[in-house]
Amino acid sequence: MTSPSGSRDRKPPAKGRPPAKGRPPAKGGPPAKGRPPAKGRPPAKGGPPAKGRPPAKGRPPGKAGPGSRPKDGDKPRSDKPRAPRIPDDITGKEIDRRVAAELRTLPEELGQTVARFLVAASRALEEGDVDLALAYTAEAKRLAGRVSVVREAMGITAYAAGDYAAALAELRAVRRMTGDQDYVPVMADCERGLGRPRKALELLAEVPESKLSDASRIEARIVAAGARRDLGQPDAALLLLQVPELNARRTEEWLPRLRYAYADTLLELGRGEQARMWFERAAQVDPDGATDADERLAEMDGIVFDDAWGDDVEDQRPTDAASPEVEPGPSA
């Protein structure tokens, strides 16, 4: 998956607004019923009603009408939310090269501002502040909603926040704009999050695995297996996960999730011993805690631990080389 800053790991404004119900027509409309305007002088704009004349229908006394001059001390109000402040140490130069290249299609100053918002969003996500990350990416989208990497960042952040409908909409836009299929697994997982596992499988079936990068191909398998389990088909899920990459020697970003999904599926099928081994192998390649494999192992062993337990768990992990390999099953 790609962070909002690009590293791998709108509603349009209304066109005019009708006058509020009950308000008299704007300047140029007929005068108030029952009294002609003073000879040679147009009705006052926005001032108090003439003596003896009731206020215009629908407007409370003393309230200025459209086009009136604000009183001294009045400050204009805006309904647009204020953009979140970007930390001073973020320059925008931290952005990924791929993202920077696309932002160069914008005017220089605007591109730099959008880059800073995307970097700030990425940092907020890393710090676990999803709401702040959403605010940053929303402002980036407001400024540059036609740039695909900005929509991509908005989709990733919405996905991290669990707003699967918004994430799906943004990533669909990215797919239309770029033709890139590598976000299809994330889009399918959004369908799962919305309670539509069959739709997830249909979406994944649209794209041959040969059209996906290696990482996206594995992610697609993980999502498809999850959808099969959602449908009560754990045996089919296990077949999808039995790929040679389970025994990969290199630690890839997707490897902990693949092994974790395999272990969890084995556990659902009642194969506890094998499940424990694969939770252990997932933990071995997950030093950053992307999964809760350590906790699942402890749960299976009946161990109760406090929050400080994870600080020392790194020293307790066996090496991956000591674990036996499991022959992968047939591809599904």
Image (tube, rainbow, N blue to C red):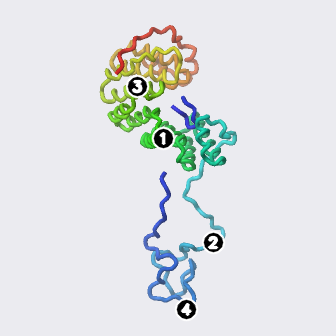
Residues 260 and 9: in front is 9
Amino acid on which the number 4 mark rests in the picture: Lys
Q: Nearer the viewer, mark 4 or mark 3?
A: 3
Seen at 48% across and 21% down, the residue is 256
Which quadrant would residue 302 be assigned to in this image? top left
Task: For marks 4 and 2, give the CA distance.
Answer: 28 Å
Residue picked out by circle 2: 71
Task: For marks 2 and 3, give the CA distance.
Answer: 65 Å
Residues 169 and 279: in front is 169
- Residue 166 visible somewhere in the drawing: no
Seen at 68% across and 40% down, the residue is 91
Residue picked out by circle 4: 39
Question: Which quadrant does the C terminus fall into?
Answer: top left
Give the mark nearest the N terminus, 2 or 3.
2
Seen at 57% across and 32% down, the residue is 7
Give the mark nearest the N terminus, 2 or 1.
2
**Up-down relation of residue 245 to residue 217 (above or below):** above
Residue 174 locus on image (x, y percent): 48, 41
Task: For marks 4 and 3, give the CA distance.
Answer: 82 Å
